[in-house]
Amino acid sequence: MEGPPAESREWRLEPETEYRFELDPGVTLAIKLVRGQAEIFGAELAEAKAYLFTSECKAAVFTWQGCIIEVTGNASTEYVSEETPMAAYANVHLAFEQMRVRALGALHGEPPHPDHADAGTEPPRVLVLGPENSGKTTVCKILTNYTVRAEQGWTPMLANVDPSEGGWSVPGAVSVAPISSPIPTSSPANPLGSAASSAPMAMESNALLPLVYWYGHSETKRNPLLMDRQIRNLGENVNDRWEVDAEGKCAGLIVDTPSSFASGPSANDHRHKLIKACVDAFNINVILVVGHEKLNVEMQRAYGSRMTVVKIPKSGGVVELDHSYRERVHNYQLHTYMYGQVIQPPNGVINPTVGGEAITDLILSPSSTVVNFSDLSIFRIGAETMAPSSALPIGATRVVSEMQPVAIDPSQPGSGLLNSVLAILAPPNPDENERYDEEILDLTVVGFIIVTNLDIPKKKMTILAPNQGSVVGRTAIVGSFEWQDQ
């Protein structure tokens, strides 16, 4: 039986202000635009639609011209801020838009505008860097959403090389996708919107088809060589796509990065190598540094002579996120991957939407299947407890390379497979002449499963998957992520 309608209140926002909110676990908030114009991280709100937010979402409703919004439900924190970095972000977008237009004009053989004769004709290929809790992902969403809203038919590429975030799949993945419609914000379980999944999806924003590689850990320092390789693989795939889509290339690319790229000991560390891997792989020509003076100086010194390095302000609304929050978000992401996302609207909210679209077909029915140990070939990349090279005795060499796929026998005690997340890989290249030892490092991911039970005497295991496809004969990689269905 439903209780009384949840409390609603109106907020009147002046031009260039934003309503910021944070939610506690288990709380859902509904926001409706009553009058005016408003957007959430660059995605426009439609009037009279109730937008739902859940799973400890932290976001902001910004208005350029002023608006009235109706908020239903209880936020743990809510306030209006008059100080936002949106004007600075909009200026960056306009500069990128000019680069896109010049690139498209050059492609079609148009003479350059006299005022921009020396400006170059390359589209923006942007690397966004910043420390923890600086709002990098939000900046990427705003710039991407403004691009697809520019009514020029742009489909920019958005790459996520932050494995702790997971992008469009699950934590531990790095991915890239072409974006053709604004990315909604409703839950940290879908930080970049939702990908097309195995279920029939009615949502337009779920038509994304990302290209995914499985790194398998949340921290880049766990296996920087593997991370480097996967960044370069993503870059190769982007370039392959652009070779057959010259107009698509004009829309450019935005790369979201982990905070480990921005801070850490400067001596003998992997972060500069990984930044360079991104610059090389994606042919970066603009570096945006979010609110970090020292990093900006570092990047100016390293790259300022051959590309544009710009420091942009960090939003005062960025929330400090602790380790336990990030772990809960990983659980939200894995649960959403398996089950879809069920958002219960506050009582009394009529026709609620997620990202502006009706909440239909958001529920998945995962299947639990028993398979033989021999049905799946399971590998771990490198040794599980790998000491850094610097910690090895002098003269000693590593027995297992950080890039070497090591076969896992589920029947061995201590295999570490129970409750583990496994990435199911695409089949290898059918051309037998191209086989090589580390081929599985370069295969993309077609889906994820969880090992929920191991029956060692019968040599069988139970797996949970979001659909009923067979895994017989497939290859899987296990990382360090585990998940138990609560």
Image (cartoon, rainbow, N blue to C red):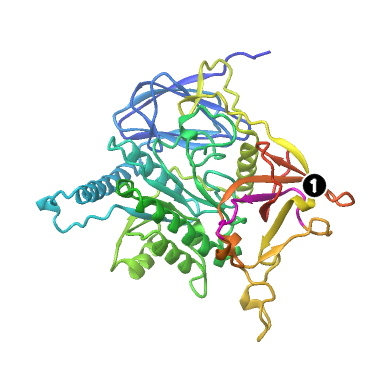
Q: Is residue 27 left or right of residue 380?
A: left
Residue 424 placement, left or right of 92:
right
Which amino acid type is marked by label 1? Met
Q: Residue furthest bottom?
A: 395
Left or right side of 199 for 280: left
Residue 443: horizontal and vertical position, in percent? 56, 56
Report if residue 427 lies within the magenta region. Answer: yes
Instruction: Reply above or below: 414 against 201.
Output: below
Residue assigned mark 1:
461
> At 66% from the left edge and 86% from the top edge, which residue is drawn?
395
Q: Quick one: SS at disc 1?
A: strand
214 or 329, which is in the foreground? 214
In the image as oriented, which residue stretches furthest toward the right?
A: 457
| Overall secondary structure of the magenta section | loop
* Figure quadrant of the N terminus: top right
The x and y percentages for residue 225 are: 55, 67
In the image: residue 96, left or right of residue 320: left
Residue 279: % across, % down: 39, 63
Q: Quadrant of residue 147?
A: top left
Q: Residue at x 47, y 39 (%)?
A: 208
Stretch of the chain drawn in magenta: 416-431
